[in-house]
Image (cartoon, rainbow, N blue to C red):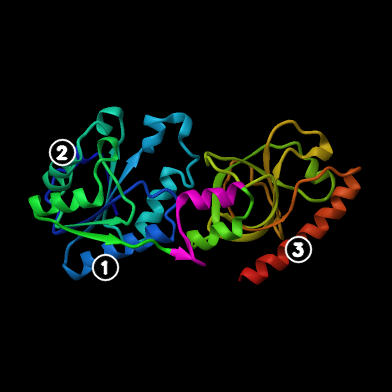
Amino acid sequence: MLVIRDAANIKKEIKTPVVTLGNFDGIHLGHKTILNYVSDMAGKTDGTAVAITFSPHPLKVLSPDLSPAMLTTFKKKVTLIRDEGIDILVCARFSKKFADQHPRSFAEDVLVGKIGAKEVVVGYDYRFGKGREGTIDYLKKMGEEFGFAITVIDAYKVEGEIVSSTAIRSFIEDGEVDKASRMLGRYYSIEGRVINGMKQGIAIGYPTANISTPSELLPHTGVYAANVNIENKRYNGVVNIGFNPTFKRDRLTIETHILEFKGDLYGCRMEIEFIGRIRNEQEFPSAEELAKQIRKDVDTATKIIAKAG
């Protein structure tokens, strides 16, 4: 997949572009439906599947106080979009000047002028341009004027609930990572580099890898069963997100006990995929009691992971 930073950097004519546009935060099942449609239609017309997204997220520019924590880093989002069969990803640099564009100018200058869109595919609730004036009806009028077709993809539902980044974010914040996974179509994950910790896990027989992560959204404090990906190898793990009250810690940490792993991970990159929540974080009267609970957590995590397949 070709990644183009800013539509102004498009230099060559794009062959029969089928285009979608959106923030695509999380690349959930609703987004995948849209991206898959674009990829399929481009394949049928011997054309090019194009996605336009924005960086940073518009709310980070227009209303920073209201901007939600992102479900994916930009790097992860690019990877997930590529995996859905998109040929070209255009990352528009979102600024206040960009936001002030009238929807018609965006359609004429970017969709037609730079990309040459033949078909534009959007979700049922998409809006664009200054003041979000670019409704789907307005986009259809622009299509009639400039000669591109419009396809609107209906809402995707899981167990009767519309899939959305907002709903997924709420599940994760509440620690309901299993519900988030059902809407994402994959496990929610965070990535980071292993850093030095307090080594208290080693002292009680359960060494942990602590990570520093650029991810903006962490599941609610507690203990989770997880897959742990290290250098293209997958392990089972038990993850604690919290303040480790037994040892009176005063800062949030992400600590993972990796089952059946021995070795030095400091400096390595690690991805944690959250499968299910085991329990709340709690304070124990002694390190020995904590160790007993971790043994139970390992057993519970093993069962959760086995059931998830």
Q: Mark 2 = which residue? A: 105
Occupied quadrant, residue 177 = bottom right
Q: Nearer the viewer, residue 161 or 230?
A: 161
Residue 300, numbered label: 3
Q: Where does the image place residue 256, in percent across and percent down from the top left?
A: 69, 49
Q: Where does the image place residue 260, in percent across and percent down from the top left?
A: 71, 60
Whether residue 271 can be seen here? no
Where disc 2 sits, the SS reads: helix
**Height in image: 262 above or below 220?**
below
Q: Nearer the viewer, residue 68 or 240?
A: 68
Where disc 3 sits, the SS reads: helix
Residue 189 lies in the magenta stretch: no
Mark 3 or mark 1, earlier in chain: 1
The Cα atoms of the two marked residues, 3 and 2, are separated by 56 Å
The quarter of the picture where the C terminus appears is bottom right
Question: Tag 3: residue type?
Answer: Thr
Mark 3 or mark 2, earlier in chain: 2
The Cα atoms of the two marked residues, 3 and 1, are separated by 42 Å
- The structure residue drawn at horizontal position 58% and vertical position 52%, both measured from the top left corner, is 171
Q: Are marks 2 and 1 in contact (CB under 8 Å)?
A: no
Question: Tag 2: residue type?
Answer: Ser
- The structure residue drawn at horizontal position 63% and vertical position 49%, both measured from the top left corner, is 174
Q: Mark 1 = which residue? A: 40
- What segment is highlighted magenta in the picture? 157-173
Whether residue 208 can be seen here? yes
